[in-house]
Amino acid sequence: MKFHRHPGRRATVLSLIAAATLAACGGGGGDSSGASAAALAAAIAAQQAGAGGAGAGNPPAPPPPAAPQPEETRAQDSRQFTVDETKLPFAALSGAPDTDRWWGVLEGAGYRVEVPKNWNGMLVMYAHGYGGTGPVVSVSDPTIRAHLIAQGYAWAASSYTKNYYDVRAGVEDTNALALAFQRIASQNGRTLDAPRKTYIVGQSLGGHVAAAAVDAEALETANHKVRYAGAVPMCGVLGDIELYNYFGASQIAAQQLAGLPVTGWPVSNWNDLLPVVRNALFTRFPSATTAQGEKYKAIVKNLTGGERPMFDAGFAGSMNATVWGTFGRDGTINGILNRDGYDTTGIVYQLDNDPAQNAEEITFNQGAYRLHADPESNRLRRDGLRWFPKSNARIDVPVVTIHTLGDVYVPFSMEQIYKRRADALGTSKWLVQRAIRGISHCDFTTEEQTQAFDAMTNWEQNGVKPAGDEVLDAATVARADYGCKFSSASRGGCPAP
Ligand SMILES: [Ca+2]
């Protein structure tokens, strides 16, 4: 049992002070100057150690480690968030097994923990979705809470210390809570063993947190390190920055089809252009399109996963408006990055379902304004995870994902991108993906979620690899019954099994 798992916090404070000093001097904290400064410090330390003289029989003291080169800061670092502690207490579920329920604040994040009296020795961390940009952070209970405690699992959920799209905070604060599990139990008068296994499940941004938390890169770079035994990212942002590339590409396509092509980024007068672009593409937004709007719809279909069931309803629904709500922004993801992170250089716009490029598509692609991410925008950091953590698919534990087909906000293409990454790394044997016939974002039934969780745990505990869906074969994904295998029967629309 360790009570002192907080070295990262003190280091961060020191880094901020040092970074502020550097910024005042106009220094940017580049890698090369950092390396030379560290070398100089080491040389001075070695010289001092030598000058001090080693006593007879004593080996010379090793030089003290050089101070870490401070990182630059960004808008997100100076934003203040608070926990509303009156919202932390939570009640037992009626009809559920008897549990202990604890809540509090850990390192600036609110948390809830629930442990069955008859605990099975395993812990499930729940990572919540995007919490908006407000100043108060909130805890959410797992969507499969009843199932978890019925099975004897303990669960814990962090509010994260920060709102905005801060997956770095999500991973660090969720991991910090997992590491504090025994201590929290002890403080509440219950002595527990360390969890035999710790899993992580999450939705949307929390799906990104879950995928990033089981990635080898998190074990290498996070300040709070947790070795998870398995993960269930649901409706997750599994393509990390590719989600934002899709948002940028969508705005560029919409403007070009409306005859108001993007000529610079960000589009500072987007609010003026919005009604014109929208009216050029929709007779009723977002459910009825013009002829140009049909082309936009085809482009979005192909950017979000290709021809597939539920897409039409998803495009006509509120998630399309949510995507349009991101238009007009710059490439910093609201201050999560300092420099442009959007990149559309790899985007191929398709006006039809044929992967080949016809003459109209060639012209469209040649005319499309291209966003180029600054290579420094999301580089590895010296003080923890990347600002926009990667879901590289560098995995060696079971990962079972679910994703709705009609979601155009965090689209099904996230699953395809993640699968391609796993294929390229040879890690696909650890990945099972399930298509769900929902039309919105995260609109799963409880059954679809509990089945995915049970599939992952049965795989991890008993070696029984579960079935999943093929996500990359276009003909398979386009089938009318695609997604029927793992969608609840209550949804209807599928042939009887
Ligand atoms: Ca084509």
Image (cartoon, grey):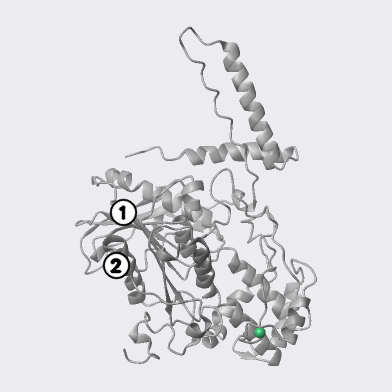
Whether 424 is drawn above or below 411: the answer is above
Residue 410 marker? none
Counting from the top left corner in percent of width and height, residue 422 is at 49, 64
Res. 17 image quadrant = top right
Residue 197 marker? 1
Counting from the top left corner in percent of width and height, residue 241 is at 59, 63
Label 2 amino acid? Val
Q: Disc 2 marks which residue?
A: 464
- Quadrant in the picture for the N terminus: top left
Whether 374 is drawn above or below 279: the answer is above
Tag 1, which secondary structure?
A: strand
Quadrant location, ligand no. 1? bottom right
Counting from the top left corner in percent of width and height, residue 323 is at 60, 75
Taking the view exactly as shown, the residue that stands out farthest to the top is 56
Category of crowding for the residue at label 2, using alpha-carbon neighbours closer than 10 angstroms: few (below 14), some (14–19), many (at least 20): few
Q: Horizontal placement of 186 versus 492: left or right? A: left
Nearest to the observer: residue 111 or residue 37: 37
Is residue 276 something that shows in the picture? no
Residue plotted at (57% across, 84% down):
315
Is residue 186 something that shows in the picture? yes
Res. 449 image quadrant = bottom left
Label 1 amino acid? Lys
